[in-house]
Amino acid sequence: MRIQVVCLLLVLLAASVLSKDENLRPTYDKFKNQHINKQMNTSDCDDVMRKREIFVRKNKRNACKPVNTFILADESKVKSVCEKGTRQGKFVKSKAVFNLIACKLTNKKTKYPKCKYEGTKLSKKKILIKCINNYPVHYERDLRYCEA
């Protein structure tokens, strides 16, 4: 009887862990869509922002996002920051450095979806992200050399 109870508890525990990961899936997928792009160039900002439908909500309407940063790495390397990085409050700082592209809106009066962006390459930057259950869910910022 005790073995059955222990087995049942283990099954319930495993189910709750899997359920937590499944609940995180939409948030993690949004993070990947908005911030991971291994093959991107600075000239790709307009197309990538449009195709991935990256925008902000203002007054119940879609609006151009002022700035968005893409990490030029594969998903596994970015995800490893959550496991191997250094905790800083509610965020995790990467130990590894990343190349980034920051896409900045060129005209704040532009209406979505006709947003125009200028891309800037940032080399060898550490990043600060929020992780939940070892999944990146929010990109906070890159770190300047003196902060890293």
Image (cartoon, grey):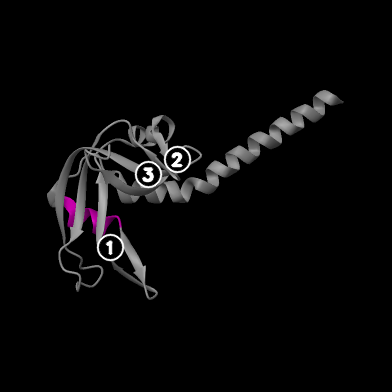
Q: Considering only order in the chain, which callout, 2 or 3, is on the residue closer to the N terminus?
A: 3
In percent of width and height, residue 22 lies at 54, 44
Q: Specify the amino acid type for callout 2.
A: Tyr
Q: Is residue 8 above or below residue 115?
A: above
Query: Distance between the Cα atoms at labels 2 and 1?
Result: 23 Å
Identify which residue is drawn at 70% across, 37% down.
12
The residue that mark 3 highlights is 129
Q: Relative to the observer, which residue lies in front, 75 or 143? A: 143
Q: Relative to the observer, which residue lies in front, 127 or 79? A: 127
The residue that mark 1 highlights is 65
Identify which residue is drawn at 47% across, 37% down.
134
Query: Distance between the Cα atoms at labels 3 and 2?
Result: 10 Å
Q: Specify the amino acid type for callout 3.
A: Ile
In the rendered structure, which segment of residues is drawn in magenta?
Answer: 44-52
In percent of width and height, residue 135 lies at 45, 40
SS type, badge 3: strand
Determine crowd level at label 2: few under 14, some 14-19, many 20+ residues with C-alpha closer than 10 A: many
